[in-house]
Amino acid sequence: MPAVELNSGSRVVLTLPSMDELRAELARLLGSLRPELTTADPPSAGGRTVRRRRW
């Protein structure tokens, strides 16, 4: 889960998970918002580009 925190210098520090976790989370969010965008490919399908319909 990405964590956002403000430090004393008023800079936003964004802590990101690994790329696979991020991709899986994104796919989950997209799937919950727009079910027609989900594909049969699992989030861990290597670095393959998955073609999706534009919205």
Image (tube, rainbow, N blue to C red):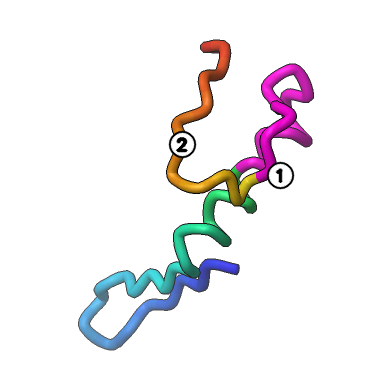
Q: Give amino acid for label 2.
A: Arg
Residue 13 placement, left or right of 38 = left
Magenta residues (range): 27-42
* Side of 48 where 30 appears, left or right: right
Quadrant containing the C terminus in the rendered view = top right
The x and y percentages for residue 24 are 62, 51
Residue 4: which disc?
Answer: none
Q: Label for residue 48?
A: 2
- Mark 1 vs 2: CB contact within 8 A: no
Neighbours of disc 1 within 10 Å: few (<14), some (14-19), many (20+): some
Queried whether the magenta region covers residue 37, the answer comes back as: yes
- Residue 28 is tagged as 1
Q: Quadrant of residue 33?
A: top right
Q: Is residue 7 left or right of residue 15?
A: left
Residue that appears at 42% across and 73% down: 15
Mark 1: which secondary structure?
helix
Q: Position of residue 19 (x, y in %)?
A: 45, 59
| Residue at image location 45% in from the left, 31% down from the top | 49
Q: Is residue 45 above or below residue 33?
A: below
Please state which of residues 6 and 28 is positioned toward the viewer in this rendering. Answer: 28
Residue at the top extreme, as displayed: 54
Q: Is residue 43 above or below residue 22?
A: above
**Vertical order, 54 against 30 (above or below):** above
Query: Quadrant of residue 12 in the image?
Result: bottom left
For marks 1 and 2, give the CA distance: 17 Å
Outermost residue to the bottom: 8
Front residue of this view, candidates 18 and 10? 18
| Of the image marks 1 and 2, the number of the one nearer the N terminus | 1
Q: Label 2, secondary structure: give it.
A: loop
Q: Nearer the viewer, residue 46 or 10?
A: 46
> Which amino acid type corresponds to the residue marked 1 in the rendered image?
Arg
